[in-house]
Structure formats: structure tokens, C-alpha cells
Amino acid sequence: MSLRTVASKFVELCRQGKNFDVMHTLYASNIVSVEGDGKETVGQGPVIKKSEDWVADKIFHGETVAGPFFNGETPDQFAVYFTLDVTPKSTGRRLTLEEVGVYTVKNDKITREQFFYDGDH
Amino acid sequence: MSLRTVASKFVELCRQGKNFDVMHTLYASNIVSVEGDGKETVGQGPVIKKSEDWVADKIFHGETVAGPFFNGETPDQFAVYFTLDVTPKSTGRRLTLEEVGVYTVKNDKITREQFFYDGDH
């Protein structure tokens, strides 16, 4: 698959709400996931676990994904812009989270994801 | 100024439609601007000229800017997501362009901008 094929599949699955299918099928076994505070999680299993923990505290109302977007100088990367409409169970206050994700693809798998956002997520 | 101060000023000026004020006040003299196809333009003057040329062919209806967004692993960078509502004079067809911009800040000036998008812009 080309970068564009992987990126299109990524966005298509996210738009269907199949974010965990993305992680199970497109993430490399040694993926590095970098949160907004710079904290790294390494490995497909731990990264999926991180998302499971995040989801466990949320009521999920919806998600939008803009992209994928590309830049020729980093031809192994694509970027997307997410909005996440959620209610954290801990607060009960519904809110829209926004973030930019930059994904690196090698051998048809996502080997790195770096999230840019503001505040807690 | 901190990265956050520069990023907030950037977004505030863009939301006021003052994109050229951004370039005149926040761009470093040796800024490198990287378009979606990977093409680099170097220097504040040439980068402003590139934008002037881009604008000259457009009827501009509006712009949204989401962000700024941050990632602790690259503490000199911020990201934004733009939508640009324009009609290219060459086609007369109104359209919404989307892009992610990743900006690098050094000594309170933007030294690099890298745009991710899809298709012609």
C-alpha cells in the first residue's frame, strides 16, 4: 500500500467509529505514541491499552476527522485534525476536544503518532 | 515571549484576517516555508511574496483557525488547522481548502512553517 492508501484507510475507519480497528490493523508492533505532554508509549499492545483506558472514562457522542493531509518533504507522514465530542464520566461535563495527529508510516504500518493539543485530554 | 505567547498571537491575528501582519511581525528573516508538495521558500520577503501571489488569484470569503495545539516532545512547535473559504479567480468556483500547519519558533520568531494538505492549494 502507498502512504495515501494507508492514510485513506485510517480516515475511513475513524469515520466509521472503528478507531480500535485502526490500531489492530494499521499500527506496527513497535509503534511509538506521543501524547501532547510528550509522554511516549511504545508497542501496539500498550498503545491500545492506553486508548482503552482513555475510552473507559468517556461517554462518546461523536468524532470528526479532517484529512488526510500530506507534505512532500516528509513523504512518510500524514496529518489529520480530530474533534472528539465526549463527556468524561468523572465530570459529567460534555465537551469537544480537538487535536492534530501526525502519523508516520513505514512498510504499510503506522510506526509513530504524535498528537498536538491544548490542555488535558 | 514563550512559544504559547507567539502561538496565541499568531492565531489571534489570523482570526482577525491579519495574516500578513503575522508574516511581517512574527516571521524570522530566514524563515523556511514548506508547501504541501515539499517545495521550500526561504526568507521572509520571498515567503510574503508567495502569499501575495496566492492571494492575488483569490476572492477571499473567510478563514477559520483551530488551535494552537502543542506537543511536549517538540517544545518549539505548535500546530493549527485552517479552513480557507475562497473562490479562485481563474475558475470562479468557490471551495473550502483545508490544511494543517506546523510552525517552529526560535527566539520568539517563526523560523519554519510546514503545510500538510491534499491536492492543489
Image: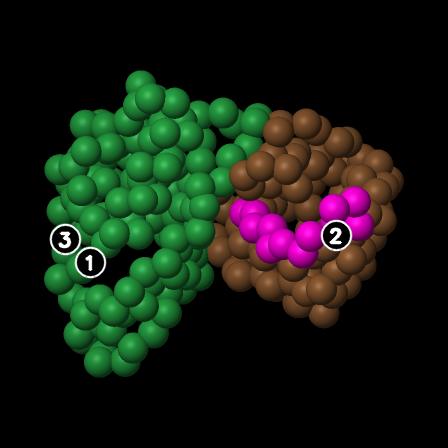
Chain colours: A brown, B green
**Seen from this angle, which residue lies furthest front?**
A92
The answer to whether A10 appears left or right of A99 in the picture is right
Residue A93 versus residue A5 in the image, above or below:
above
Amino acid on which the number 3 mark rests in the picture: Glu
Q: Which range is magenta?
A: A88-100
The answer to whether mark 3 and mark 2 are in CB contact below 8 A is no
Question: On the image, numbered disc 2 is attached to which residue?
Answer: A92
Question: Which residue is depicted at the point 49% across and 40% down?
Answer: B69
Q: Secondary structure at mark 2?
A: loop
**Mark number, residue B54:** 1
Q: In the image, which is nearer the foreground, mark 3 or mark 2? A: 2
**Mark number, residue A69:** none
The answer to whether mark 1 and mark 3 are in CB contact below 8 A is yes
Coordinates of residue A87 in the picture (x, y in percent): 72, 55
Q: Chain of mark 3?
A: B
Q: Quadrant of the C terminus of chain B?
A: bottom left
Amino acid on which the number 2 mark rests in the picture: Gly
Residue B64 lies within the magenta run: no
Question: Which residue is depicted at the point 29% across and 34% down?
Answer: B32
Coordinates of residue B48 in the picture (x, y in percent): 16, 44
